[in-house]
Image (cartoon, grey):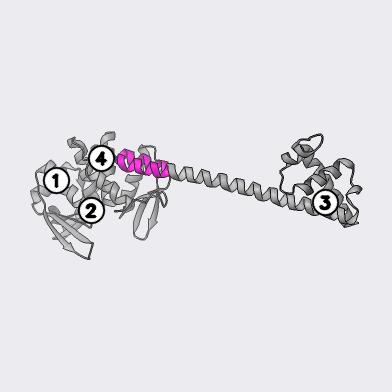
Amino acid sequence: MSFSSDVKAELAKSISTARHCRIAMLSAMLSMVAEVYYRNGCPVGMSITTERSVIAGTIAQLMKKLFSIVPEASVRKTGSNSRIYHMAVLSPDSVCRILETLKLSAGRKQEMSDAAYAGYSCQNMHIDRMIIQQPCCRRAFMKGVFLTSGSVSDPNKGYHMEFVCSNAKRAELIESLIRDFKIEGKTVRRKKYSVVYIKDGTMIVDMLNIMGAHISLMNMENVRILKDISNNVNRRVNCEAANLNKTVSASVRQMQDIEYISAVKGLRYLPEGLRRLAEVRMEAPDASLKELGERMNPPIGKSGVNHRLRKISEIANELREG
């Protein structure tokens, strides 16, 4: 299973016992995947189609607990590991009761009344904010939205959470809800869908906490900690490697300058302090500035060694130019 599937499986097992939170969660789920059928402007049936058993099972469970309704269900195999789950509520009274309780209302009633029979996606329906007034209900609502239309990438590969909506108004609602929790999401148009996404790893962890996916949260935090440790180690190794390369390059350059002076003028051409340092460098080509200073008699500091090596380099360049 993917990390996203693990999150959804965990969320499906943590349904609130509070009726108002169950209403908010079911309202979110049906508003994303259900379709209501109307005859002469009146609802006569509801259809839910999904490719995930966890979604179908959670919706059926919530319908039974809230309304004592068991939807008619069927499964169609579409591949070796894929299924299409279809559920239907065919009683007009039951559909009306569900819509009224979940505060889902259709727009364009005049257009629907003009058609003898028409289907209407619940994503185009209006959600009354009365059902998400309380923070706990907003959490339950976002849990339902994630179950039906959300996904989150494997934290080992990157940080990305998104909610896919079929229209811009639903995306605006989701973006405003997560903003209420101090989480910044952005909306982008992807083909015919509006997608609300979060890229920040810390905010994704906060979102998992808000929805109640605490086990997945801990798993993601463990991955983030290991990645941070690995990145810090890599940075330190790279820094040490860069310093080593810098030291080796400087040493090679210094040796070339000293050898050039020795070949052209001889080391006695150098003042005594520079000549002694040149001899020490020739004796210890891999030594650091600190080690070179300790080999001098009397010993000198790193800045003194660096200053004398620069003077040797200047003398070598003058000889080359001359």
Q: How many marks?
A: 4
User: Which residue is found at the position 20% from the left and 47% from the top?
Assistant: 105
Q: Are marks 1 and 3 in contact (CB under 8 Å)?
A: no
- Labels 2 and 3: the sequence-earlier one: 2
**2 or 4: mark nearer the eye:** 4
Q: Are marks 2 and 3 in contact (CB under 8 Å)?
A: no
Magenta span dominant secondary structure: helix
**4 or 3: mark nearer the eye:** 3
Residue placed under numbered mark 1 in the picture:
63
User: Which residue is found at the position 39% from the left and 48% from the top?
Assistant: 155
The reply to whether residue 90 is in sight is: yes
Mark identifier at residue 258:
3
| Quadrant of the rendered image containing residue 259 | bottom right
Out of 246 and 175, give the one closest to the viewer. Answer: 246
**Residue type, mark 4 in image:** Ala
**2 or 3: mark nearer the eye:** 3
User: Which residue is found at the position 65% from the left and 48% from the top?
Assistant: 244
Residue 220 magenta-highlighted: yes
| Quadrant of the rendered image containing residue 75 | bottom left
Residue density around tag 1, few if under 14, some if 14–19, many if 20 or more, within 10 Å: some
Mark identifier at residue 140:
4
Residue density around tag 3, few if under 14, some if 14–19, many if 20 or more, within 10 Å: many
- Labels 2 and 4: the sequence-earlier one: 2
